[in-house]
């Protein structure tokens, strides 16, 4: 048995032995390798149109295009919350944020009871060998990222909490043993170590000497790319692959449709009282000028081609290990990103740019007649967990809010819902508004609430005057913030009125350029969508208090740690 650090062994031995024993019994008596393997691949900040198969005419993604051509490409897939932590928690729990209650500003961590109901843990309890490689951005248990629960929950762990950066060894010691330096290639070493069953990668936490060959596996590969936390740290080092230095630099990069430079903004996309763009995080300032936007876009496409190459090599590894005919691959992203469209940068809004993501499900065990097709069904990230459990032959927990997509995959059904619901509860001093959205294939309705958050710029100004690191004012969440967040969750259900609304005809205006909410001609449609919103937000909220625990700067001081932003 090999574990990277002795303290993990001491803290987790009883837990590990019980799980290994249970897995061994389950494998021997019930499952065996007749159940499919799964590889779940999650990118970071990847908008829908960043692959050849989703319409990008520049980027080279032949392996992802091939995966889409051999599987099912969902062309109308959306996340539930367009920001990292709540979106990733929604994928794991199959719950809307309004139900699971976890965000950067929530002051909470996922309780262990809720963690046990996530799809990787259900699979592990039922005999699957589980692995997690790359980024984790969901705090779990008392102490959140420092609890050690995530590390102990997987048979194979080769990951870091929070951002990885383009050179992950500089942020996370667990990757020190990798031969590579760049993120995609470091994670590829973990993928090879897991699939080859060698498990010799220094730093990886493993709880058995090797993966049993007759035991099905569930592997998650989670990137921190093409997120700017990764691309902004690219330095064209001598050790970088050539693609990260020169690829796409010989062409004239286009700007996004509807791009507006900061100096050219005449009328902002949203009223300044609702969306305080001047308080936006400085990491998105590159969208203000065409030159910087093109540079970031070039880096993003380089990262996508790197990810694509890993996908190709992963599939080759599966073939070499004779695992390809029984391994289902799912590819998606946690949300999209504004690149200067309408002058906007960042995410945490309900527009298509941030909510519309790629989703590919490749199932080699399915009938060939059901593969190689596109589906425009309205699907969401919360549908992934129930679909994977269904494909593995397990029952779906009552706590899940997503839909099982297996009938859509097989062609038995064309749709699983009539409307999508998305939301943003990350409304802080960085200026983003609270908002909610409902949409069908033709129409989209967004509603916004009063933004009374104190200004980030004023906090920064005071911090500089006082000699306080600005991050201590900007990224610390305190106990009082829990109450504010809970009010964000509940107040629309208790009658808080919207202060601004948008209505878009997606059939003629897919880029959401023209707000029709004040047009008398569309008053009936507006009323109809308001009624849909009322129903959908109640479903998203669910019943009862979320299964969370306190996770704030105050709680961590009491635990004698002191929390730092991830």
Image (cartoon, rainbow, N blue to C red):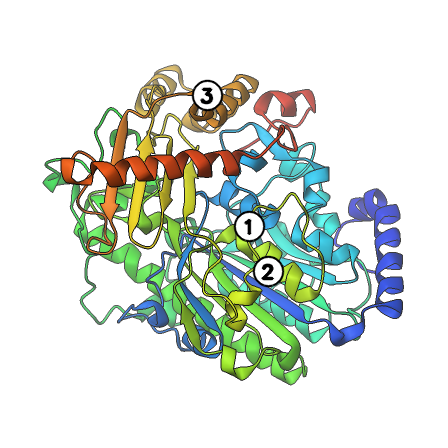
Mark 3, secondary structure of its residue = helix
Q: Residue at x 37, y 62 (%)?
A: 236
- Front residue (pair 116, 410): 410
Marks 3 and 1, how far apart in space? 25 Å
Mark 1, secondary structure of its residue = loop
- Residue 403 placement, left or right of 23: left
Mark 2, secondary structure of its residue = helix
Decide which of tag 2 and tag 1 comes sooner along the chain: 2
Q: Are there few (<14), some (14-19), or many (20+) residues within 10 Å of tag 2?
A: many
The residue carrying mark 2 is 387
Q: Are marks 3 and 1 in contact (CB under 8 Å)?
A: no
Marks 2 and 1, how far apart in space? 9 Å
- Front residue (pair 182, 163): 163
Residue depth check, mark 2 versus mark 3: number of the one nearer the observer: 3
- Residue 119 at least partly seen: yes
Q: Residue at x 29, y 35 (%)?
A: 527
The residue carrying mark 1 is 402
Q: Quadrant of the N terminus?
A: bottom right
In the rendered image of this protein, does residue 410 appear above or below residue 207? Answer: below
Check residue 494 in the rendering and tell me which mark sits there, or answer none.
Answer: 3
Q: Quadrant of residue 482?
A: top right
Decide which of tag 2 and tag 3 comes sooner along the chain: 2
In the rendered image of this protein, does residue 160 appear above or below residue 406? Answer: above
Q: Residue at x 67, y 37 (%)?
A: 146
The image position of residue 268, as x and y in percent, is 17, 35
- Residue 528 placement, left or right of 131: left
């Amino acid at each position: 048995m090999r574990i990277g650090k002795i303290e993990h062994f001491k803290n987790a031995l009883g837990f590990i032995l019980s799980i290994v024993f249970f897995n061994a019994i389950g494998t021997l008596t019930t499952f065996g390798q007749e159940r499919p393997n799964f590889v779940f691949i999650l990118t970071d900040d990847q908008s829908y149109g960043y692959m050849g198969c989703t319409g990008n005419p520049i980027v080279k993604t032949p392996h992802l295009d091939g995966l889409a051509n051999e599987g099912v490409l969902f062309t109308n897939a959306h996340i539930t919350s367009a920001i990292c932590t709540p979106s990733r928690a929604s994928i794991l729990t199959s719950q809307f944020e309004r139900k699971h209650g976890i965000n950067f500003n929530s002051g909470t961590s996922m309780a262990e009871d809720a963690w046990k109901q996530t799809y990787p843990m259900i699979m592990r309890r039922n005999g699957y060998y589980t692995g997690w490689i790359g980024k984790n951005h969901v705090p779990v248990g008392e102490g959140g990222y420092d609890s050690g629960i995530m590390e102990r929950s997987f048979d194979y762990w080769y990951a870091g909490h929070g951002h990885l950066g383009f050179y992950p060894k500089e942020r996370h010691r667990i990757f020190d043993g990798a031969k590579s330096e760049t993120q995609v290639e470091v994670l590829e070493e973990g993928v090879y170590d897991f699939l080859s069953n060698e498990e010799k990668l220094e730093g990886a936490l493993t709880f058995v000497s090797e993966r049993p060959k007759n035991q099905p596996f569930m592997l998650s590969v989670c990137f921190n790319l093409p997120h700017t936390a990764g691309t902004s740290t690219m330095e064209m080092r001598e050790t970088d692959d050539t693609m990260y230095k020169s690829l796409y630099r010989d062409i004239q990069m286009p700007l996004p449709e509807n791009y507006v430079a900061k100096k050219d903004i005449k009328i902002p996309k949203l009223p300044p009282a609702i969306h305080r763009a001047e308080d936006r995080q400085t990491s998105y300032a590159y969208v203000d000028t065409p030159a910087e936007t093109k540079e970031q876009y070039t880096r993003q496409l380089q990262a996508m081609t790197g990810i694509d190459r890993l996908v190709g090599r992963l599939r080759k590894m599966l073939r070499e290990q004779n695992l390809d005919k029984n391994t289902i691959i799912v590819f998606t992203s946690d949300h999209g990103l504004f690149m200067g469209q309408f002058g906007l940068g960042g995410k945490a809004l309900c527009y298509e740019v941030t909510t519309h993501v790629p989703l590919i499900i490749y199932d080699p065990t399915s009938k060939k007649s059901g593969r190689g097709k596109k589906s425009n069904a309205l699907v969401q990230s919360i549908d992934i967990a129930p679909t994977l459990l269904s494909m593995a032959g397990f029952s779906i927990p009552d706590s899940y809010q997503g839909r099982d997509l297996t009938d859509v995959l097989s062609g038995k059904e064309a749709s699983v819902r009539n409307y999508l619901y998305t939301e943003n509860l990350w409304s802080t001093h960085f200026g983003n508004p609270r908002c909610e959205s409902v949409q069908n294939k033709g129409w989209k309705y967004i509603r916004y609430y009063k933004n009374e958050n104190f200004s980030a710029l004023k906090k920064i100004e005071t911090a500089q005057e006082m000699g306080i690191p600005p991050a201590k004012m900007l990224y610390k969440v305190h106990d009082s913030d829990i109450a504010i967040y809970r009010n964000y969750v509940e107040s629309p259900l208790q009658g808080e009125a919207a202060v601004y609304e948008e209505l878009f005809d997606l059939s003629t205006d897919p880029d959401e350029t023209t707000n029709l909410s004040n047009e008398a001609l569309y008053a009936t449609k507006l009323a109809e969508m308001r009624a849909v919103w009322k129903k959908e937000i109640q479903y998203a909220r669910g019943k009862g208090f979320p299964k969370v625990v306190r996770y704030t700067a105050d709680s961590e001081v009491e635990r004698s740690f002191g929390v730092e932003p991830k």
